[in-house]
Image (cartoon, rainbow, N blue to C red):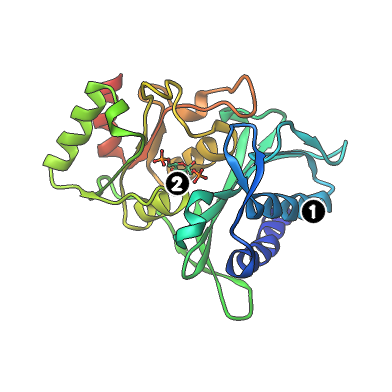
Amino acid sequence: MEEIFEAIKTVSVKIQNALAYEDTNYTNATNATGDTQLALDVKCDMMIQEQFSKLKCIKQIISEEKPEAMDIHEDGKYIVAYDPLDGSSLVDVNLSVGSIFGIYKHRVDGENLVSSAYVVFGPRVELVIAHNGVKLYRLNEDKKFVFVKDIKLNQKGKHNAPGGTQKNWEAKHKQLIDDIFKDGYRLRYSGGMVPDLHQILLKGGGLFSYPATSDAPKGKLRMAFEVFPFAFVFESAGGEGVDGSKRLLSLSPSHIHDTTPCFFGSVDELKRVRKVYG
Ligand code: AFP
């Protein structure tokens, strides 16, 4: 496992460099979910593939940018699912983006996720690893990740990050979000899952939601490389992740690119979600 975390650290420095200086143009290609790929999406995917291919402990990799799983080492123990550049539509406006990693044993489903990590590329580069607790690291000027602190959520937060096109929300979802704002929560939503969830984690709590909508009845966010890794982070930090009623980590995708509605946050906000959706 440590080898995988070290590989994530090494490749993050390369990704940071690519984000800072390389072309931000779109390609003519689309990925498995139908998103038009940036040259940077493809580049970051290749850099991670290259780094992980060196590790004997990795059996298979699954990337948001690849239509199928890719075999790496037959005798490897782990399957690593990753989103190389989450929030790539924010690259052209220079907002924070991230990379997300889920490390699985045997099969890619919530119950077989053994640890997860994500990297935030903002003014600083930060790495969060969920493995025996949740730890925050920051890249220093020598390009080394230095431990900053353990991350623990409070029982209740102050921030609300409501995803999805509002005109396509169900009435009960609109009511939930309106009620949360009426109780004084502040809007915090950039459109990048990594910085939006990172903010909720570091500010002690709140709610991030990406519900089922009339145009995306199964939500937008992908289980294997977005939803399960963050559900693991939130649970390990003392919060929760649900699809409305069920624990996200109890779900199994039937295809590697399957999506699910999702809600992440601290205990009090998730109680409100279950009351509405349960
Ligand atoms: P892109 O990678 O296409 O920018 O999508 C980012 C994302 O998957 C996730 O990071 C955000 O939480 C979510 O989409 C935002 O979606 P909306 O633009 O529909 O709010």
Q: Is residue 110 above or below residue 11?
A: above
Residue at the far bottom in the pictured view: 141
Q: Residue at x 58, y 80 (%)?
A: 141
Residue count near mark 1 (Cα–Cα under 10 Å), binned few <14, some 14–19, many ≥20: few
Image coordinates for residue 222, horizontal then vertical, percent? 54, 33
Question: Hey, what amino acid is under mark 2?
Answer: Met
Direction from residue 71 to residue 234 in the image, left or right: left
Q: Is residue 231 above or below residue 245?
A: below
Q: Looking at this view, is 20 or 39 the one in front?
A: 39
The quarter of the picture where residue 81 lies is top right
Image coordinates for residue 102, horizontal then vertical, percent? 61, 42
Q: Residue at x 47, y 38 (%)?
A: 231
SS class of the residue under badge 2?
A: helix
Image coordinates for residue 160, horizontal then vertical, percent? 27, 45
Camera sees residue 229: yes
Disc 1 target residue: 50
Numbered label attached to residue 165: none
Numbered label attached to residue 193: 2
Q: Residue at x 37, y 58 (%)?
A: 202
Direction from residue 103 to residue 249 in the image, left or right: left
Q: Residue at x 26, y 27 (%)?
A: 173
Q: Earlier in the sequence, mark 1 or mark 2?
A: 1
Q: Looking at this view, is 1 or 141 the one in front?
A: 141
Quadrant location, the C terminus: top left
Residue at the far right in the pictured view: 74
Q: Is mark 2 within 8 Å of ligand 1?
A: yes
